[in-house]
Image: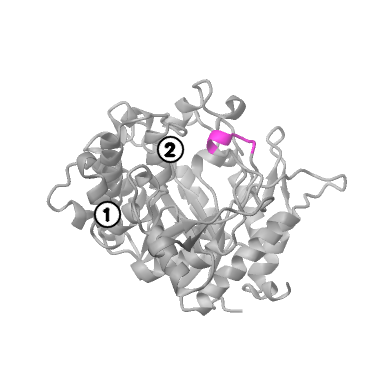
Amino acid sequence: MGFPEKFIWGAATASYQIEGAAFENGKGLSVWDTFCRKPGTVFQRHNGDIACDHYHQYQEDVQLMKELGLQAYRFSISWPRVLPEGVGRLNKEGLDFYDQLTDELLDNGIKPIITLFHWDYPYELYTRGGWINPESPDWFAEYTKTVVERLSDRVEYWVTLNEPQCFIGLGHYSGEHAPGLKLSMDEVLAAGHHALLAHGLSVQVIRDLSKQKCKIGYAPVGSVVIPETETNEDIEAARRLAFSTSKHQAVWSNSWWMDPVFLGSYPEDGLKLLEEHLPTIKAGDLETINQPLDFFGVNIYRGTVVRAGLNGQPEKVKLDAGYPRTAINWPVTPKALYWGPRFFYERYQKPIIIMENGLSNQDWPSLDGAVHDPQRIDFTHRYLLELERAIRDGVDIQGYFHWSLMDNFEWAEGYNERFGLVYVDFQTQKRIIKDSGYWYKRLIESNGRILENK
């Protein structure tokens, strides 16, 4: 099999989804703390007040990671746990938690990979306009400085933002996620531009202040397009759609969120279509956004299948009746983990790390006390075969992180979806490694070679 010798195998989580301790030890409010209190926003009014109680059980959770054989663990830092008002006053206890977690990981031979922002925006900064405020990039840079000064002597890998398409698109356009806003396209694009500026300033801070040689990346959603056949016509149609921008889907456009970061410009088709809504783009903004990066982190779960239609134009292919789908009703499309990395690598020429991939499944403890989840094993096996194919075809892929380490608070879906390699009983906080977790352990030990055994 084609996984490189130094390939990184890991699992990922996010702070609000697992930590709990939402109001303890000086932590400030996040927009998710307040959003969960609004009726009709989250499944059955669930919230992340306790979640997986990782804040108190992190040592036991690191032992689970060790048992799974994880080489790396991607986790995010809660901005308001570190800076309760978002800027200014430091909450020492909050930063101490991440300091201790980092040490615990390293003591157990697990590489920490830090995501600075995974959606839990400080509520106090939200009241000052949040991402719409032109000062927001500077706020994020100050927060980055606080974390880097404390942890960069031990942390090598950094990710700035996770999925701006979601925290801007779902949070500020459709209102499905925190802070639950439905803004005009003008305001949405302004907020997005400020988030990209925040990314660029954050990269500069990490580069300037890191106490060791660091590796920095960015983790947008990968909206993958899969050609129906491997004819040149279908491949070109898929590539064209993968990097096009439509007026009403700009918040999900790959090129709108990736081109400025990796190429230093917004896509021409997007600039033309969105001309009347564009934010003020000041001199030097795109240079700030377009910082040198070490890797392209990308989250991929599924893809859209297309063919070449009339005049070669992309034409979406309807899925067959009864197509396989996950518990959250996402289609199972393993080739997304081939065509996504391939197209992104062709366009941006950066080493790729799959920062999230996995599925929600119907999991519960069986009568024998174990959690049997053959669908997750089959799903991951199929997707990784495609990822391995991409590597064999010359795509520089350096790591894979399963989403998620453990069942957790799945945003607007609350605790209704289970994505974990580890089962969590949210009433007792008991953890059970699922069959997929033990399979993943064997996969890591073999560096992917067990995939040969179909």
- Quadrant housing residue 20: top right
Amino acid at circle 1: Asp
User: Which residue is rendered at x = 14% and y = 53% of the image?
Assistant: 284
Q: Secondary structure at mark 1?
A: helix
Query: Looking at the rendered structure, which numbered label has been put on residue 269?
Result: 1
| Left or right, 327 with reference to 85 | right
- Crowd class of label 1 (few under 14; some 14 to 19; many from 20; radius 10 Å): some
The residue sitting at the top extreme is: 39
The quarter of the picture where the N terminus appears is: bottom right
User: Which residue is rendered at x = 68% and y = 47% of the image?
Assistant: 361
Which of the two residues, 371 or 102, is positioned nearer the viewer here? 371
Q: Is residue 23 visible?
A: yes
| Residue at the disc numbered 2 | 170
The residue sitting at the left extreme is: 283
Q: Secondary structure at mark 2?
A: helix
Picture coordinates of residue 114, whole percent (x, y) = 44, 53
User: Which residue is rendered at x = 69% and y = 38% of the image?
Assistant: 429
The residue sitting at the front extreme is: 310
User: Which residue is rendered at x = 44% and y = 32% of the image?
Assistant: 178
- In three-dimensional space, the C-alpha distance between marks 1 and 2, rounded to whole angstroms, equals 23 Å
Read off the magenta span.
411-416
Picture coordinates of residue 443, whole percent (x, y) = 66, 68
- Crowd class of label 2 (few under 14; some 14 to 19; many from 20; radius 10 Å): many
